[in-house]
Image: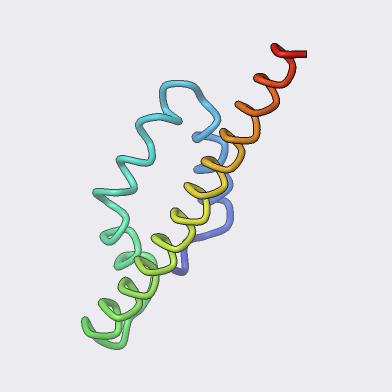
Amino acid sequence: MGIPGATIFVWIILLMVPIVGFVFPFYLLFKGNELAWQYRKWESLDEFRESQKKWAVASFIILGIFAVAMFVMGAWLAMMIRSILHA
């Protein structure tokens, strides 16, 4: 989106700070489009909206993969704990 690399690096560091790491994603949720609009020159509003739609689809796909992975890992962990307790 044209955001400087140093800014992204600072954001990643902020995500690791306990309280900020919980609040910061909500900041990006509400301000992300505004930041994307400001940091890049767009040909038109339609181009910007199309780009945001693509990012939204990619985000939902990644979220879905993450949710499935967490479910699989949780099920595997539960099976491992159960096998250890019944051994």
* Residue sticking out furthest to the left: 45
Q: Quadrant of the C terminus?
A: top right
38 versus 9 height, above or below: below
67 versus 73 height, above or below: below
Q: Residue at x 50, y 34 (%)?
A: 14
Q: Residue at x 52, y 41 (%)?
A: 71
| Rendering coords of residue 55 (x, y %) | 39, 68
Q: Quadrant of the N terminus?
A: bottom left
Q: Left or right: where does residue 2 sit relative to residue 83? A: left
| Rendering coords of residue 77 (x, y %) | 64, 29
Q: Residue at x 29, y 85 (%)?
A: 47
67 versus 87 height, above or below: below
* Residue sticking out furthest to the front: 86
* Residue sticking out furthest to the right: 87
Q: Left or right: where does residue 24 sit relative to residue 33? A: right
Q: What is the image's colouring?
A: rainbow
| Rendering coords of residue 84 (x, y %) | 74, 16
Front position in the image: 5 or 46: 46
Q: Quadrant of residue 5?
A: bottom right
| Rendering coords of residue 63 (x, y %) | 44, 53
Q: Residue at x 24, y 86 (%)?
A: 44
